[in-house]
Image (cartoon, rainbow, N blue to C red):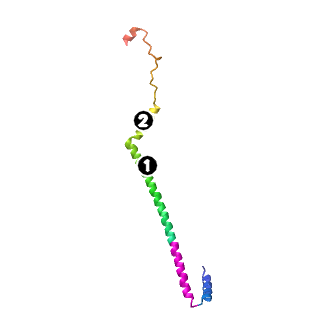
Amino acid sequence: MSMGEIIVILIVAILVLGPDKLPDAIVQIAKIIKAIKRNINDAKAGIEKEIRIKELKDEAQKYQDEFSLSNENIRKKLSFEEFDDLKRDILDKTKVDLTFDSREKETPPQNPTEKANV
């Protein structure tokens, strides 16, 4: 509000209320404005508090997730699950068919003397 607007409002207020009721009206208006400001500040503080609570909940959830992950890693290390998984992978990759095929026989030496020289 500019100074000119304030002067116009005061002149209208003096004309409407008169000089004897004007001070009481100004006091009432000031009380109303103060109450409105207080309510706005309370609402703002409540919103900021709710935002902070949300941030704290998110941070607590993050720490809980990290703790759970660390707990799982420790449990795996203590139970050697990683080694079991690694062992299983190695066995799967190195499976060898160890069945004996009767058709594959060693050829006997051709000369019985060759066997004696060996």
Q: Label 2, secondary structure: give it.
A: helix
Kindly identify the residue that appears in the image at 39 percent across and 40 percent down: 80
Main SS, magenta region, reads helix
Residue at numbered disc 1: 69
Mark 1 belongs to which amino acid? Leu
**Which is more toward the observer, 65 or 116?**
65
| Marks 1,2: beta carbons within 8 A | no
Classify 10 Å Cα crowding around label 2: few (below 14), some (14-19), many (20 and above).
few
Give above or below for 69 relative to 84: below
Image location of residue 109, percent across then percent down: 42, 11
Q: Which residue sits at x=53%, y=72%?
A: 40
Left/right placement of residue 113 relative to residue 46 reads: left
Q: The C terminus appears in which quarter of the rendering?
A: top left
Label 1 vs label 2: CA separation?
A: 23 Å
Q: Residue at x 44, y 57 (%)?
A: 60
Magenta stretch containing residue 111, yes or no? no
Q: Quadrant of residue 63?
A: bottom left
Name the quarter where the N terminus is drawn.
bottom right
Residue 85 drawn at (x, y percent): 43, 38
> Relative to 74, does residue 91 appear above or below in the rendering?
above
Q: Is residue 23 magenta?
A: yes
Q: Is residue 49 above or below residue 66?
A: below
Image vertical order of residue 29 relative to residue 66, above or below: below
- Which residue matches tag 2? 87
What type is the residue that disc 2 sits on? Lys
**Residue 110: x, y in percent?**
43, 9
Mark earlier in primary sequence (1, 2)? 1
Q: Which residues are magenta?
A: 19-41
